Image: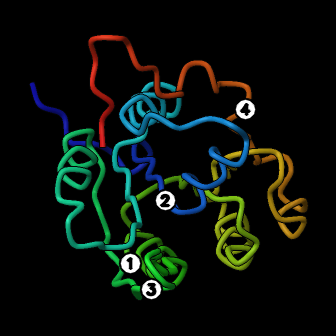
Amino acid sequence: MNKKKRKSDRIYVFIDSQNLNLGTQDAGWKLDFGKFRLYLKNKYNVSKSFLFIGYVEGNAALYRYLQECGYILIFKNVLEIKKGSKTTYKGNVDAELVLHSMLEFKNYEKAIIVTGDGDFYCLIEYLEKQNKLLKVIAPNKRYSSLLRKFAKHIFTLESVRDKLKVSIKKSQKPHP
């Protein structure tokens, strides 16, 4: 029998991919996004995982991999900045993450916000006041001091680093 999910069963996660990726790298490790998706599903019973990411031409393999892991990708157009032979990309996903968390507001019981960025203070504060904030997952212990007010909700990935880091075996190619 296929039971319809009740609202009380629905936990959604909204992920600032740039903050997550750079935050774990700053802490000296690289996150395996596939392991992270499974961790969210198993630990918090997350039913939908929205990953906010800059769209860069040529990253189709990465985007396909993330979708295969179960992420719903929300793309942001990026600015391409060339300095000599080096190209960097700038794409701030903050507005998209806030917008989508509000568009989905009636569809979830609790939300997890994955970021260490203080720009999300107003969203996190609102979710807490509405009793919809389950967790704020920060990539490392160096998250914005603005978020300290929500300390009881904050979890850093450092304690589960060994479970979530990319591990490359000799015969295994790294994923994109």
Q: Which mark is residue 17?
A: 2
Q: Which mark is residue 103?
A: 1
**Pointer 2 or 4: first along the chain:** 2
Residue at the limit of the structure toward the left, as seen here: 1
Residue type at tag 3: Lys
Q: Which mark is residue 158?
A: 4
Q: Are marks 2 and 3 in contact (CB under 8 Å)?
A: no
Residue found 64% across the figure and 67% down from its top:
127
Q: Residue 85: x and y, percent?
A: 43, 77
**Disc 1/disc 2 C-alpha distance (Å):** 19 Å
Residue at the limit of the structure toward the top, as seen here: 170
**Pointer 2 or 3: first along the chain:** 2
Q: Residue 48: x and y, percent?
A: 34, 50
Residue found 66% across the figure and 52% down from its top:
23
Q: Residue 62: x and y, percent?
A: 26, 51
**Pointer 3 or 4: first along the chain:** 3
